[in-house]
Structures are given as C-alpha cells and as structure tokens.
Amino acid sequence: MLEAYLDIETTGLSRMYDAITVIGICLTDGSSHRMVQLVGEEVTRANLLEALEGVGVIYTYNGSGFDLPFICTSLGVDLTENFKHHDLMLDCWKNNLYGGFKAVEVQLGITRETKGVNGWEAVKLWWRYHIDNDQDALAMLLKYNEEDVMNLETLRERLSIGRNDLRYTEYTNMERRETEMAVLGNRRGGNPIVLNLGGSITNPRRVPFTEKMFEEGWLQDLIEDHPELLPIAEIEPAFAPVVSVGREVATPSGYIDNLLLSPQGYLTIVETKLWRNPEARREVVGQIIDYAKDVSHWAFAELESKVQGYNLQRYQSNLGILDSIRRIEDIDESEEQIIIDTISRNLRTGRFLLLVVGEGIRESVEEMADFLQQTPQLLFTLALVELQVYELGAKGNKPLLVIPQIVARTREITRAVVRVEGKAIESVKVEVDTEITPSVSPPKRFTLTEEDFFNTLRQRVDAEDVEFAHRIIEDAQALGCIIEWKQASFAVKLLDPGGSGQRLSLLVVYKNGHAELRELGSQLHSIGLPEQVAYDYAKESAKLFSECKVSEKYPGFWSRPVSLSELRQQYKEFVSVLQKTIDRIREASKG
C-alpha cells in the first residue's frame, strides 16, 4: 500500500466562496517518491482519485479541518470514505507543538527554500498567474506547495510516527457524512418525502422529542460534533463557520450547553431545550441572557483557559483558541493578533450570538418577546432555532434526517430574531419588532458582518479609505445597486433588469483594502446579454489606474487588484464608467 502526503492551495479560506488552485500529493512506498500536482482546471474529482489509486493512508497537517473538507465541498468527494486519514497537527498538539505548519517547522528546525512565502502570498501568486499568465509566479507557487507536501513526511519522521500508528485518525468521518446529507437548510412548513430510485415515495416518520432517545444531552452532543448543522450563516455570516470550543461551560449563572467560535472571532452561545420541559416557556431566554452577561465579563485570557481545558478533556491536548480555529480554517500568523483583538473587543462589548435550539418553539415565542421587552440588559443577537428530526428507516433504526429551521414570521411570531443595540451591557435599547410597519427613511443599521468588515479594514488602511468604503456603498445604492456581504468582502451588484434574479457583479471590495472586477462577463452571458459590456467596462476603468490593464486571459478582469486609495483618487471618473455600464446593461435587457 502506498502512503500519500497531501496539501492544497486555494484562493482563500472559505469553502463556500473560494476555489482550490493546486492539489499537491507525494506518493511513497517507503523507498521511492513520486510528486503529483494538479493545477487549475486539472483539479477534478476524477484526476484526484486517479492520483490516489493504490493509497492506503493520507497524511496532512490540519487536513481534517481544512484540506479534506475543502476538497469535499469543491469536488464532491469525501476522501475519508476510501482512505485512512492521519492529521499530523493532532500529533503536534500531543507533543505541545502549536501554531500553523510553518511555526511548527521553525520549532523543529525544518527548513524550506521558499522561506517568507505564506498562505496569503500563495493566493497572490495564483492570481498573478491566473490573470497575467505569470509563469514565474506559478513556478514559485508550485515550489511552495511542493515544500508543504514534502515537509509533511519530514514532520512525521521528526515526530517518530510509525506506519501502524494511527491513533489520531479522524473519528467523526462517518458521523459527518450522515450530517452533510441531513442538513437541508431553512424550511417554512410541510413534511419531507423521500423519492426512491424506482419512483416510489417514502414518508419519513417525524420523531417527537418526547421519545426516550431525546434528552438535552443528545442535542448538546449533536451540536458539539456537528455545529455546522446550525443555520448560523443565515442569521449572521460573521459568526460562521464555527468550531466547538466549550461544552457545559461553567459561569456564575450556570453551565452553557455549547460554546462555538468563528474564525473571525465571534462567539455563539447555545442553550438547548426540549420544549416539553416546564421551564422552557420563559426561563430559557432569561437563562441564556444571564450566560451572555457572565461571558461579557471575561478577559481573553479567561476564555483561552476555558478553551484549553475543554480541548484537554476532549482531545487530550490543551490547544488554545487559535489552534482550535485552525481545525476548520487555516489562518496565517499575521492574522493572529487581529483575531485576538476582535475576540477581546467582542467580549468587552458583549457582541455574541445567542441561539436557543429545540423543538416546538412557536407557541411560546410571543411570551419570550414580552419577556425580552422587560429585559433591557442586552447587547446581543438572539435567534430561535427549531430542529425537526425524522427517521428514514424502520422505527428505532438510523439514519436520522435533521432539519434546522429559523423560526421567523409565523402567524404567532412576526420576528424571532431580536436585535438589541447599545453601548454597554448595563444600558441598552431593546427593540422587539412584533409588528413591521413601513418607514419612509429607516435608520441605518449595520449587520455584524459589516461591522467585522470595517473593524478589520480599519487595521489595514487609513481613516480616509475607511470613510471612502462607506461612500462606495452609499453611492452604489443610489445608482440602484445592492450590496452583497461575504466573510471577507462586499460586492456591488446590479439585479438583472430583465428579471432573471441574476446578481451582476460590478465591483468587489476586500477588507485588506483592495478592489477588483470579477465575473461580470460570464454572468451577462448566462442571461443572454452581450459580454462586450463587461469587457468595455474593464478596459475603460483599467485606464484610470497606473500599471493596470485588462487581463489577457480574462478580458473582464483587471490585471491587478486596485487599492482603495487609488480608487479614491480616480473615483469621479470611475463612477462615470460604472454609471455608463449600468445604463448599457439596462438598455440591453430591453431587447
């Protein structure tokens, strides 16, 4: 059996919005080695499985948190189904070696020729190749990836891990596979059906939470093992994705059922309740609010200590907050202080997401809203999530279908997500919108994703550019555009005037202070409008910036990102080009 060392390069950290650029694999039988690198369009499911033919074990660093889930999302293949997987990061933790792979390399004296190149540089190298056909950039990226892969074997040797030592093989693979099938998103009502291969229909049995199998401990276990089942991104994108960092966390008010953390530094507090319990009607909301008040008095060091204690019990290694985040997303060392500062600020201001998760939530929500109106000590976002569970097989047999639902705008509840605004935990303004009435000029409200964007942007650019980013948003909306928020950027988009629902991308601004044009040409093509509009837009706007031109390979893209300061200096001219492009799109849609 062959052994494989695997590492991927991507355009970013998000499995939802970014893509794999390189998959590097070193195959060895113990005496000889063969290096395989799939690049760009070569990154396919078929090519990957072909490259891994004959492999018994795959070795990675943080592969269980980053590489393998990214591959699963992007290529639709769960490598843990057919291969044993050994995550060397967990062995490092066992030996008190923490940090990213490069930090561990330094601690163990492992060298590399591409010293100074990190994950963010790898992203920029890819775009230099992808947009400008820069072969030197590609060569450097492939060398960097090769050293990532080859150093995995060196790391394994330094840790003295034998071929049969698989103590840390990822143990949640089978459970996660079932959950990926089961999580179906938001539902407004009705019951699911199973359409069998022969055309027949099966009606799954709804499992009431009164049955013996369900205890609140069952819910806590489910959320701890599979926090991705919670529809957090639909409530506040800045809070997603999440990693579990606490279970039964002690506070003066009691024990927090589940504590979750996002790579951006946002905490989610989860209270699980089976609504058959007598206290669930009102006390659950007061309880979770008390937990949030307690957590808001923690300093970063106290949270770090609690996370280390949790991981020591669960993983037999006292990894801290940053290494916990690395279980789901790779983070550069340059980002570590920003994450720490964000967490500290959120603790200080009480900026949390509170989730009450259970079953049968609707009939008691109005009482909760009344209770919240009498409780002004809040600075949180609270959401009520119902879990519906169905048996797909015979009674008492798995698998189970778990459907999470955000309870909102039902007959009993106008809004189940309560927004609370204020400057301090002890003195805030509470607004519970149980009746929605039109407003001629509603006050400007920022989502937490916006706040995260601008908080990070302030650390990267000067105050003038931060203010300029706000102006871009306001001017874009005045032109009839919408703003679409992602975890690391916002995009100025125009809804297709023809009514297809397509959102046409006109400008993307990142929280590192850069802007670029994206896939407008392909979007226009998909709805039958002329791609030339996108090409002309890129050509005319690129002329405004020094050493910027239209990409040779992708005519609708700029050849390089443009900084906010550059865009600000040419903003009047850019808006003129933007307005002309919007007018052309609207005119073309009439034909």
Image (tube, rainbow, N blue to C red):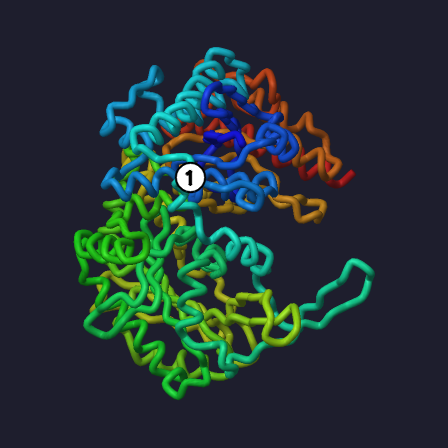
Rendered position, 136 above or below 233: above
Where residue 572 sits: x, y (%)?
46, 29
Where residue 36 sits: x, y (%)?
54, 22
Residue with the mark numbered 1: 164
Residue 460 showing in the rendered view: no
Q: Secondary structure at mark 1?
A: loop
Quadrant of the image occupied by residue 159? top left
Residue 239 showing in the rendered view: yes
Rendered position, 248 above or below 55: below
Q: Residue at x 74, y 70 (%)?
A: 202
Residue 42 appears left or right of 320: right
Query: Local crowd at mark 1 within 10 Å, few (<14), some, or many (≥20)?
Result: few
The quarter of the picture where the C terminus appears is: top right
Residue, far bottom: 278
Q: Nearer the viewer, residue 521 or 261?
A: 261
Where residue 55 sits: x, y (%)?
55, 33
Rendered position, 151 above or below 253: above
Residue 412 appears left or right of 188: left
The quarter of the picture where the N terminus appears is: top right
Rendered position, 317 above or below 100: below
Task: Kindly identify the amino acid type of the residue bearing the numbered disc 1.
Answer: Asn
